[in-house]
Image (spheres, rainbow, N blue to C red):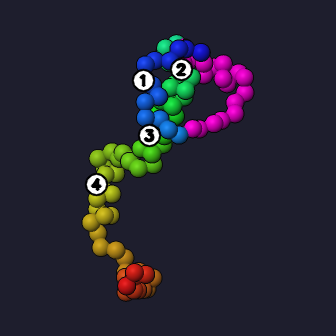
Amino acid sequence: MATRSKNTNSGRNQVINIRVQQKQRDLIDSAASILGKSRSDFMLEVACQEAQNVICNNTFFALDDEKYQEFLAILDSPPKADEELRQFLTAKSPWD
């Protein structure tokens, strides 16, 4: 395992524990060592990067120009009026 860099734990006050297989720990330690990081710093950095990717992939989406124009047209068009929508729009809000 790599040595800790200065101030890596600054402001950390929560603990996350996980169980792993020996080969998983060895793999993580090897990658952390290559980057000159401790196991904890490596795991935290990689987990946070992946968490950001998951959030981004479920928040943003990309469309080509044609699909984007179709999307805008759908957003700009009035909703299809039906009874369910009419009831929803005329129902009292729970906070009213």
Q: From the viewer's perspective, is the residue at label 1 or at label 2 nearer?
A: 1
Tell me how far mark 2 sits from mark 4, CA to CA: 48 Å
Of residues 47 and 84, the one nearer the viewer is 47
Q: Residue at 71% x, 21% y: name it.
A: 23
Q: What quarter of the picture does the N terminus occupy?
A: top right
Looking at the image, how many numbered discs can be counted on the residues? 4
Q: Circles 1 and 4: CB distance less than 8 Å?
A: no
* Residue occupying image coordinates x 46% and y 18%: 5
* Residue positioned 50% across, 38% down in the render: 13
- Spot occupied by residue 39 in the image (x, y as percentages of width and height): 57, 23
Q: Is residue 86 left or right of residue 25?
A: left
Say which label, 1 or 4, has the lower sequence index: 1
The kind of secondary structure element at disc 1 is loop
* Lower sequence index among marks 3 and 4: 3
Classed neighbour count for the residue bearing mark 1: other residues with Cα under 10 Å, few (<14), some (14–19), many (≥20)? few
Q: Provide the residue designation for mark 1.
A: 7
Is mark 3 in CB contact (under 8 Å) with mark 4? Answer: no
Q: Nearer the viewer, mark 1 or mark 3?
A: 1
Give the structural element (helix, strand or loop) at label 4: helix
Looking at the rendering, the stretch of residues picked out in magenta corresponds to 15-33
Q: Earlier in the sequence, mark 1 or mark 2?
A: 1
- Measure how far apart labels 1 and 4 are at the Cα level: 50 Å
Kind of residue sitting beneath label 1: Asn
Quarter of the C terminus within the rendering? bottom left
Residue 95 placement (x, y as % from top left): 40, 81
Residue at image mark 4: 69
Q: Residue beneath label 2, please?
A: 38
**Marks 1 and 2, how far apart in space?**
12 Å
